[in-house]
Image (tube, grey):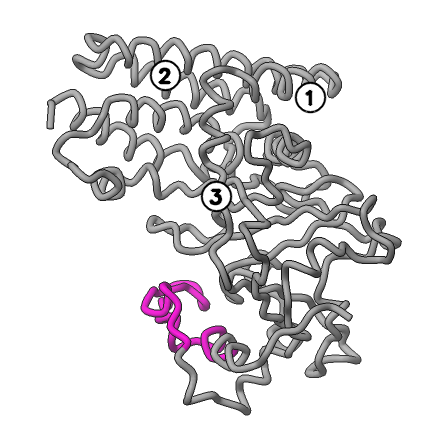
Amino acid sequence: MQINQIKISKFISASAKKLICLKPNTDSYSGFLKKHLTQYLDDLTNLNVVTKDRQIAITIRDIARVNDLIFKIADFYENGDVYKATNTFFDELMFDPAIFGIIDKATNPLDPDAIFYRARKSSIDNANNNLEQKDMFHNAFSKRRKIVNYRFSINGYPCLYLSNCSYLCWEEMNRPNLHELCVSKYKYVGINDSIWTVNLDPIIFNKRHIYDSLKQPSVIPIHWLCNLLIRIPLFFIFLNRVKEPGSHFKPEYIFPQMFTNFIKEGVLNTPAQGIKYPSTKVMDNECTFFNYIFFSYPNACKGEYCDFLSTNFHFTEGFPITYSLIKTNKTTSYNPPFASKFINIAHGMPTEYSSTIFFNHESILNSISESKLP
């Protein structure tokens, strides 16, 4: 492998680790973006020998242009000009020649029979009782007022939020009491690649993944590395950790929510129906835990729930997670990729996932058949 590629690969991994899921430490969100993205560009520009490569020089100019657009959007928004901010995001940043192709190529179909989980809190009066299927689906169209502001949400627009494990559901809900937690298992039953997602998986920046992703790891194409270099600013603005979780307005959600609107418009060459993104609450260098948002289509529905989503996802009712304390399923073959991973259920006390109540509950749900929403 050429020295240039080695140096750039290390720079990509180090930069991604430093920037992705970073929490703002200043009151000005635009100031936070400018500080870190300017530093990222300066570090790349000053990286020894890279400017001798023409493709890298072009990429540096592309990143400078993308950074300027990001700063412009953030300034518009902070000054109250949401119209200009949104138009600049849609018309300039997303359709920038360095950006559009990257997003388009990040779109992938869901794996057949993929399994997901969704959790809801039950009322105190209903603790330890199952929740009906409809209570475990997206908010009914007539109950838009109950929709909470999420990272990739659209105000008042029902979406289906799923995670790849019940533990992540619990973390995303800010760790409610377990006796109030009901979990449902979802199974993707779509055919002919009916659902595609834009994949925001930071594992692509891992140096080992860069090598493993290529048939000849000793010869990494420079265009591959340039692609990753341009992606880092995008992942940075989409995956900032929230500085003040209890605040009504979260500036860290500005860019992700605009991105949701953009993807939902269906302008990609392969239109996506959802977004896959890592949790910013569970810090995980191996990128094991993921959330998903799937769009609903109210105009094509006759009832309170999205026909497209209910056709493509079958799911169980919500079972209290405490159910797993009195029931076990020793015959299951449940073995998720994160079974041997350690998580911090009690702060400072890592526990192997396969030893947790979450794993046991998922194991039990694995033996229960899903069904279509009635």
255, above or below 287, in the image: above
| Closer mark to the observer between disc 3 and disc 1 | 3
Residue 304 drawn at (x, y percent):
85, 57
Quadrant position of the C terminus in the picture = bottom right
The residue shown at (51%, 23%) is 100
Residue wearing tag 3: 108
Furthest-front residue in view? 192
213, above or below 362, in the image: above
Quadrant position of the N terminus in the picture = top left
The residue shown at (28%, 35%) is 13
Residue wearing tag 1: 86
Query: How much space separates mark 3 and mark 1, taking CA atoms?
Result: 26 Å
Query: How much space separates mark 2 and mark 3, taking CA atoms?
Result: 29 Å
Residue wearing tag 2: 41
Q: Earlier in the sequence, mark 2 or mark 3?
A: 2
The residue shown at (75%, 18%) is 83
Residue 171 drawn at (x, y percent):
54, 60
Residue numbers of the magenta segment: 334-361
Query: How much space separates mark 1 and mark 2, taking CA atoms?
Result: 24 Å
Residue 344 shown in magenta:
yes
Comparing 2 with 357, the one in front is 2
Query: What secondary structure is found at the residue carrying circle 2?
Result: helix
Q: In screen coordinates, is 342 left or right of 360? A: left
362, above or below 1, in the image: below
Residue 133 drawn at (x, y percent):
73, 71
Residue type at numbered disc 3? Asn
Residue type at numbered disc 1? Thr
The residue shown at (50%, 30%) is 104
Which class describes the residues within 10 Å of circle 3: few (<14), some (14-19), or many (20+)?
A: some
Give yes or no for contact between labels 1 and 2 (Cβ–Cβ under 8 Å).
no
Q: Earlier in the sequence, mark 1 or mark 2?
A: 2
